[in-house]
Image (cartoon, helix red, strand yellow):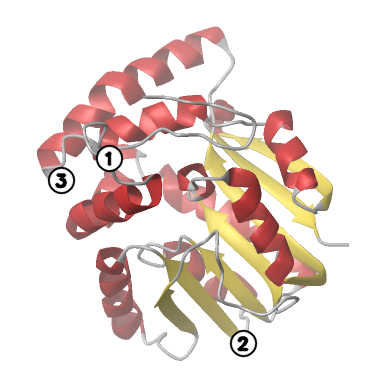
Amino acid sequence: MIQKSRYTIMVVPYKEKDSSKREQIAEMFDNVSPKYDFLNHLLSGGVDFWWRKKAISTLRSVKPKLILDIATGTGDLAIEAVKQLNPEKVIGVDISEGMLSFGREKMKKLGLENKIELQMGDSEKLLFDDNTFDAVIVSFGVRNFENLEKGLTDMCRVTKSGGTCMVMEFSNPKTPIIKQIYEFYSGKILPLIGRLVSNDSSAYSYLPESVKAFPEGNDFLSVFEKAGFTQTKWIPLTFGTCSIYIGKKP
């Protein structure tokens, strides 16, 4: 079930259900939340740590004091932002209470409850005033939006004039041999391991399907710019399996 337009990518985890993509994404992350961090690190071979470090390092020059972390999950990107940028506050929002509950426990253990606030929130209907945040960041979350342009436009709305948006998302490698290896791993190995560890047969099949359907590179930049961002930049990582996108709000 893949319906792809320029701005709406209707790949869903549970194809047999009639619920909305938003509802299915929340259900999926609630289901996998107990094993999410473990699987993230296992399935990426630990390279996800480096990806987050690289993504946050792109914001060092702008020194944001108030940061919004979209689709924060258990808060790993927010934690990396505090380590590198030392902002006054990071607010993380997510639609999965299961993910947030594990994230809050993580913040307590790290003593970061006063630096990082995690709250329920719909990334396409952000409950914040216009021009609130110095930076808006998101890792592996915009692919799950029901409407990409709508979500990015709302992210632009809450970003201060002159502020920065950083999006990190999976992408598809173009080099033939790397592409073949990646497609075999993501299509066969990743869903099998994910199913065995998480007990959710759909979640880790959804991941490669959603990556394949997602606009990447210059196609993503065109949506990014239509949402209101300028001075956009695309930074491919790890043979093109991951991409960082940077945009400024005028």
Residue 43 placed where, x, y %? 30, 38
* Residue at the spot 21% in from the left edge and 32% down from the top edge: 16
SS for dot 2: loop
- Frontmost residue, 19 versus 124: 19
User: Residue tagged by mark 2?
Assistant: 88
* Residue at the spot 33% in from the left edge and 33% down from the top edge: 206
- Please name the amino acid that badge 2 sits on: Glu
**Disc on the earlier residue, 1 or 3:** 1
**Cβ–Cβ under 8 Å for marks 1 and 3:** no
User: Residue tagged by mark 1?
Assistant: 18
Which picture quadrant has residue 74?
bottom left
Q: Tally the numbered discs.
A: 3
- Frontmost residue, 185 versus 16: 16
**Disc on the earlier residue, 3 or 2:** 2
Mark 2 or 1, closer to the camera:
1
- Please name the amino acid that badge 1 sits on: Asp
- Which numbered dot is residue 198? 3
- Frontmost residue, 53 versus 90: 90
Which picture quadrant has residue 207?
top left
Q: Residues within 10 Å of mark 2 (few under 14, many from 20)?
A: few
- Please name the amino acid that badge 3 sits on: Ser
- Work out how far the residue at label 3 is from the one at label 2, CA to CA, in angstroms: 35 Å
Mark 1 or 3, closer to the camera:
1
Does residue 58 appear anywhere in the picture?
A: no
- Work out how far the residue at label 1 is from the one at label 3, CA to CA, in angstroms: 23 Å
**Disc on the earlier residue, 2 or 1:** 1
In-image side of 71 versus 102 (left or right): right
Mark 3 or 2, closer to the camera:
3
